[in-house]
Image: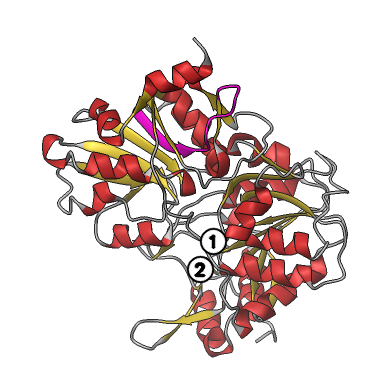
Amino acid sequence: MSVLEQYLSKLRTPDEAVKVVKSGDWVDYTTNVGFPALLDAALAKRRDELTDVKIRGNLLFGPIQTVECDPLREHFVYNSWHCSAYERKLCDRGLCNYIPMVFRNLEAYYRHFIDVNVAMMCVTPMDKHGYFNLSCATGVAKGILDDADIVILEVNENLPHIYGMYDENIHISEVDFVVEGPHDPLPEFPVETPTEEDIRIAGHIIPYIVDGASIQLGIGGMPDVVGAQLAQSDLKDLGMHTELCSDAYYTLHKAGKLTNARKASLPGKGVTGIVFGSRELYDWVDRNPSVMIAPLEYVNAPATIAQLDNMISINSCIAVDLYGQICAESAGLRHISGTGGQLDYVTGTAMARGGKSFLCMTSCFVDKNGVRESRILPHFEGDIVTAPRSQAHFIVTEYGAVNLAGRSTWERAEMLISIAHPEFREDLIRAAEQQRIWRASNKR
């Protein structure tokens, strides 16, 4: 049977395909623009026929119809490995539960510990050899599909075809059903206008970066600001090795800064695991030989990151306490995002020759009641620790950058207070004294 004959024999409408889902099943939607919107809508229509269908996804931008149609969660229970802004709002409404993880281990979780009854995801149209490209979701997709009892692919004509190292494709022979249908344009995420504090934070990082450095920029506005400043700098021959390829890398490419020429590993190739951003970004990665996508099991492995000289990791965080513990995924007990790849890169850059990890935040924020609050805290009270104090390196606010590696508790307290908002420094000193981590000095 030819690949086209196989395709036609497996072609179904979305309503037909989702009939395989049974009550009690685990269903996976993979990640970001791999979200199968047509299949999700069809499954939502079966709400009253089903109970206790558990769904997993991550970084989905919504709306997820199976979630929105069932506010009591009697039929569908949604869970996320890493929350987008939309999924965060679902958590606030009690409609999403976070699954703790470290991103590099995600495929291993599926391989060794997790059952998938039905996997559904969007892919590019099939090529003449019978392969579908996993596109922007390659970083996690194949491990999920390989674990599934039933695989349903939704062909999305708008997805870019991204060249990969391995596991970037799936063959028609590995698929149970295929669905087609018109799709809206891919979601776009315009770069936010930076604040004065954002610009100052980025300015504290740039001096630490050298020509030929490989750059990892995490999710959020701050890494995008750093990318924009790098594009305007005098730096040359920067490389891309990152969990997420965002518009910051396209900006660097347009500025002639991103050549990947000096990478010790895979020179000439910018490496990523997932992609989302603007239409221009999707067009740039489409069949671009200088961009290579691979499973996060490889991309985020500390041993892989360690091969890259002058590896620079730049991520955002929410709060840091005076011991150097870092929270990047909750505000107190309110869930915000997830561990993602932050710990992967904090670990890997420490192993790389010349490697440096920067975790960035504004020194304070104004809460919903108009009260200014410090992001540097005496100690955490329920906040989720993303990176332990034993792996804390550079912490950056608009008041400076400090490197906590190898520093004692009193040194850390002193250094962190030096980059706290001035309004909170005396209170933090008093707290450090009470916690017995303050050494009498004139640094106030």
The label shown at residue 319 is: 2
Residue 351 image offset from top left, x and y in percent:
75, 45
Q: Amino acid at mark 2?
A: Ala
The label shown at residue 145 is: none
Q: Nearer the viewer, residue 139 or 64?
A: 64
Circle 1 sits on which residue? Answer: 326
Q: Is residue 89 above or below residue 39?
A: below
Residue furthest left in the image: 48
Query: How is colour applied across the structure in the image?
Result: secondary structure
Q: Which residues are magenta?
A: 117-130
Q: Nearer the viewer, residue 170 or 241?
A: 170
Residue 194 image offset from top left, x and y in percent:
60, 78
**Residue 16 visible, this orientation:** yes
Q: Which quarter of the rendering shows the C terminus?
A: bottom right
- Asked whether disc 1 touches disc 2, contact meaning CB atoms under 8 Å apart, the reply is yes
Task: Give the side of residue 120 with respect to residue 251, left or right.
Answer: left
Q: CA distance from mark 1 to mark 2?
A: 6 Å
- Does the segment drawn in magenta span residue 123? yes
Q: Is residue 234 above or below residue 184?
A: below
